[in-house]
Image: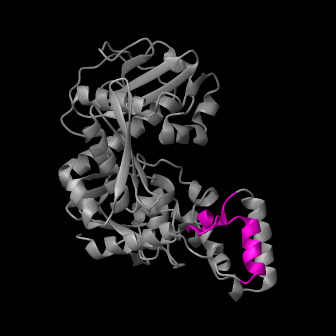
Amino acid sequence: MKNYNLFFEKLNLEYFYEFKQINDVFTCELKLKDIPFISFGKGGTPDLALLSAQGEMAERILTRNFFEEYYVNNLYPDVKEGEFLNKELKHFYKIDSLQKEELIDFNSDSFEILSIPFLNRDTKEKVYFPINLIQNLYASNGMAAHFDIIEAYKNAKAEIIERFVKFEVIKYALPLPKIDHPLNSKNIQIYDSSLGGKYPVMAASYIEDDNIILAFGCDINQEKAIKKAYFELLQSGLNNFGKIIEDIEDVRDRFNLINHFIDLSGNVHKNFLKRPLFEVCKWNFANYDVFNKKEYFKIYKCCGIFALQVIIPGISEIYPIEDLIYNNINYPKFFRDKILNYQNYEKQEINDLIEEISLLYPFTQIDSLIGIIAKEPLFIDRFKEIIKNNQKIEFSDKYLNILKLSQILKEKNEV
């Protein structure tokens, strides 16, 4: 905890936190003062829950994950324009089927394709991944922070394995073998989720009538994997249930899978309750090398803390590649300047934009859409009022603090 306290101190960040206890598990919600960043942690004691939340906060700050939805220039270190990916990865991501606009990042003012370097774990080849591709497909998957870079790597890799197995079990309605364990109770059950001894993953469920919460944990130590799944289950608060349903297509729907990723509230197919496909296996894992796939990683270091992002193409995607075409997060960038500097555009052009936004985003705050936080919530009516009175859109202190933190990270970057 001392390492993280020093990290926050050097970045001039103050935070406050709140604990909750469910059964024998403590959860922690940690918030930064004057910056809208929130992290969550869990553990067997309050101190461990706080440590977990501090680690997540450091991870999301250093990897810039918390900044992804904001308008911030020069967000990442080592940014490059021009060539990106290699031939093999261009084929995997179907780059030939994409327009340039679908690879432009959301955060910056640049309308070139900006990329950041990752290293191939085995060959150490440096490969530049487009920022927008990373943000659209991988979310926070494969990210971890620690004062020991080896531990950060293990945690990032374990997270990828855990989520891969989770999606396999849910998408294919795989019934898992139950195991006897002291954590089992009337509603809670522990499972072997190694899928026949392939992966160091355990699972835990909470089932009440047709309501279900399903959580997973990965560790080469079986008991630690069980604890991770159990802690994850209870961190949900046991109040955000999915349903046990019959329609496999509804279970495989992208929004249902995303609910499993976000808060464990996704639905589960009834086959999960049937006779298991696998037997309970002997636990025999020496490391996390369970995929025969190429692996890429990027290291961040600041104020004594390492953060790591691991990408395993074909394994660690949270969102489908098609999202670059149909659900690209960068779209509002293309009208951001018209909002912030409307005085520089023809009146009819701004009126057409207002009509488009009203149609596509009728209930969304425009400021959050374009990646800022305005002093007053910026809905369509407020924007019309600003135009009528020829006013400027004013930024809130929270947004200015985000920009300030981004600059501090740039100055203190150690990699």
Residue at point 45%, 67% (across, down): 130
What residue do we see at 28% from left, 57% from top? Answer: 307
On the image, the x and y values in percent for residue 393 come to 63, 77
**x, y percent for residue 219:** 26, 34
Can residue 252 be found in the magenta stretch? no
Q: Determine whether, in the image, residue 349 is placed left or right of residue 395.
A: right
Q: Nearer the viewer, residue 301 or 96?
A: 301
Q: Nearer the viewer, residue 14 or 69?
A: 14
Q: Is residue 375 magenta?
A: yes
Quadrant of the snapshot with the C terminus: bottom left
Residue 66: which quarter of the image? bottom left
Q: How is the image coloured?
A: one colour
Q: Residue at coordinates 29% horizontally, 14% vertically from top-left?
A: 182
| Residue 249 percent coordinates (x, y) | 63, 32
User: Against 153, is 86 above or below?
Assistant: below
Residue closer to the observer: 344 or 26: 26
x, y (%) of residue 204? Answer: 39, 24
Q: Is residue 78 visible?
A: no
Between residues 139 and 171, which one lies in front from this camera angle? 139
Magenta stretch: give its range: 364-390
- Residue 208 visible somewhere in the drawing: yes
310 displayed left or right of 65? left
Relative to 381, say whether 28 is above or below. above
In the image, is residue 36 above or below residue 28? below
- Which residue lies at the image location 56% right of the left edge and 73% below the top edge? 395
